[in-house]
Amino acid sequence: MRCKASSTTERPGVRAPTSRRRFMGMAALGSAAALGLTTISTRKPAHAAGHSPAVVIGTGYGAAVTALRLGAAGVPTVMLEMGRLWDTPAEDGTIFSSMLTPDRRAMWFKERTEAPLASFLWMDLANRDIEPYAGVLDRVDHGDMSVYVGRGVGGGSLVNGAMAVTPKRWYFEEVLPQVDADEMYRTYFPLANAMLGTNHVDRDWFETCDSYQFARVSRAAAEKAGYETAFVPSVYDFDYMRREEEGLVPRSALASEVIYGNNHGKRSLDKSYLAAALGTGNVTIETLSEVRGISQQQDGSYALSVRRIDESGNVLGIHQLTADHLFLGAGSLGSTELLLRARDTGTLPNLGEEIGQGWGTNGNVMLGRANHGQDLVGSLESGMPALGIDAWDDPVNPVFAEIAPVPAGLETWASLYLAITRNPERGTFHYDPGADRAVLDWREEQGQPSIDAAKQMFDRINEVNGTSYRYDLFGDTRAFENRFTYHPLGGLVLGEATDLHGRVKGYRNLYVTDGSLIPGSTGVNPFVTITALAERNIARILAEDVRTRA
Ligand code: FAE
């Protein structure tokens, strides 16, 4: 019997967006895309005179939550997003390009794609030369560390693996001890999951489908070594995925689509929070609009300088916008850079030394194992992980290793993992005036604790199974890749750079709402934590700081 993927159940006090509000928002997104507009709204934009009661920078998780709650409270709100809207098919009939045939849509102004799996059998098979364009995935290089981020309306939700994981409570309490964990686990984590559309894979289907053969092979190897695995909830619609495998609907997760966007199946933020935000009628999204500078005016409001570009990167102009309340949701790199620049160029001189501190990789390290010839993973691998090796409660060596796909469309005899480890190392940012950018101070050896932890787990798995590492995946002969992260966290840490609800110290009505609040680690994939924390913070800010009309 096949049952449907189950959705996160709604609980009392947990309200998913009304379908009418979301429908209106989706219609606004669709028509803006069809007409090629860079202003998306269900009503006349709220900032005709260059001023808005609230401005939110970015359209990722923290930003989307904040805009919805402001809009629902009747506060006219403008969101500024440096990337484009991803809602209209290109000439080939698809919105996004796949990992097997990436084109200019894949990356943010690069001449060649930069896939995290740099090689296969030491050959660079995954990357292609492309035309520089406002594509959906960016890799921001900071010396020994490269950070992957999403660009476009929806931020990281457009490119991520959709794994919607709530952290272990004991670890959350350790990472953010001043946050009321009872309230988070009773109210805000369930709210975040309901709003995001988190769902669970049907276990019977998982055990028999082709798409997760790769995960079952990895699970068997882990269990043989005494490790437990855990199913991972997702915001990819597992029921859609089942129908993909049955050939009933167009393929996305099963057509090697992940990091350059999914054409179907994924509940990215433009289909959840952002659609609901637009549906309030109070939220406007301006795309291809990068905030470059923030200053405070005499009356206490904030002035932003915003660089407008076209999709080819031509600068169309710099315009000014002012806001009474300013929310930074530009992600760990983006928000940290904006405040560092403002502090060090003197436009927000009261910002303190805590700006740019406490950054971490969530202990990310990637590795592959070579399987025995008979342990086939199959040629069909779902791009969306559904299982992890869960040893996070191990007091000696806590590791949560996501069993990741290699959706190459052929048998690879490889098992891939993105391990999340408890790496205590932290980086800091400084402002480089010559380049006018924030630079991350992080040395490659700071990733070594992540390698050591993952190695301990996977040495054991290899030993028990008689298998070995893959040395051909990361462009040279290394078995562990710790020079990139998908999970940048910190830079504007809660309770340090801000108060306990994201209010920036030294300034009134200036807030941080994204992953930069989290001090470098969540122990699991981070977007549910970012979303839940943003829900908690904006509830308090709306109650205490903002005059609402609702
Ligand atoms: P984020 O989503 O990064 O959004 C920031 C937005 O601000 C972006 O749209 C930027 O373009 C925009 N922006 C930046 N600077 C400016 C500026 N100056 N002016 C205007 N706009 C600006 O922020 N997490 C999970 O929990 N599960 C997963 O399965 C998972 N897989 C991942 C796979 C990949 C390939 C990647 C890259 C990430 C993955 N993540 C995953 C991480 C997750 O997407 C990330 O933690 C969140 O997206 C961070 O949310 P924020 O709200 O901090």
Image (cartoon, grey):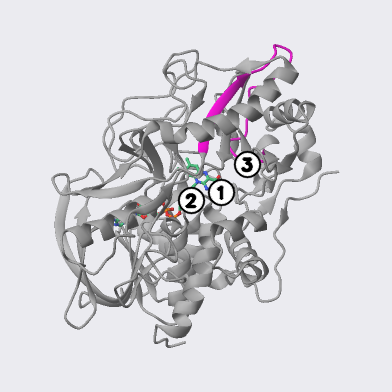
Amino acid of disc 1: Lys
Select label 3 or label 2 by which is in front. 2
Segment colored magenta: 364-388
**Residue sitting at 28 percent across and 54 percent down?**
337
Between 499 and 205, the residue placed more toward the observer is: 499
Question: Dot 1, crowdedness within 10 Å: few (<14), some or many (≥20)?
Answer: many
Amino acid of disc 3: Val
Q: Is residue 274 visible?
A: yes
Percent coordinates x, y for residue 62 in the rendering: 45, 62
**Where is 488 relative to 15, above or below?**
above
Separation (CA) of disc 3 from disc 2? 22 Å
Per the image, the residue denoted by label 1 is 266
For the stretch drawn in magenta, the main secondary structure is: loop
Q: Are marks 3 and 2 in contact (CB under 8 Å)?
A: no
Separation (CA) of disc 1 from disc 3? 14 Å
Left or right, 545 with respect to 366, comes to: left
* Quarter of the view holding residue 351: bottom left
Q: Is residue 417 visible?
A: no
**Residue sitting at 42 percent across and 86 percent down?**
548
Per the image, the residue denoted by label 2 is 157
Residue 249: give its label.
3
Left or right, 248 with respect to 43, comes to: right
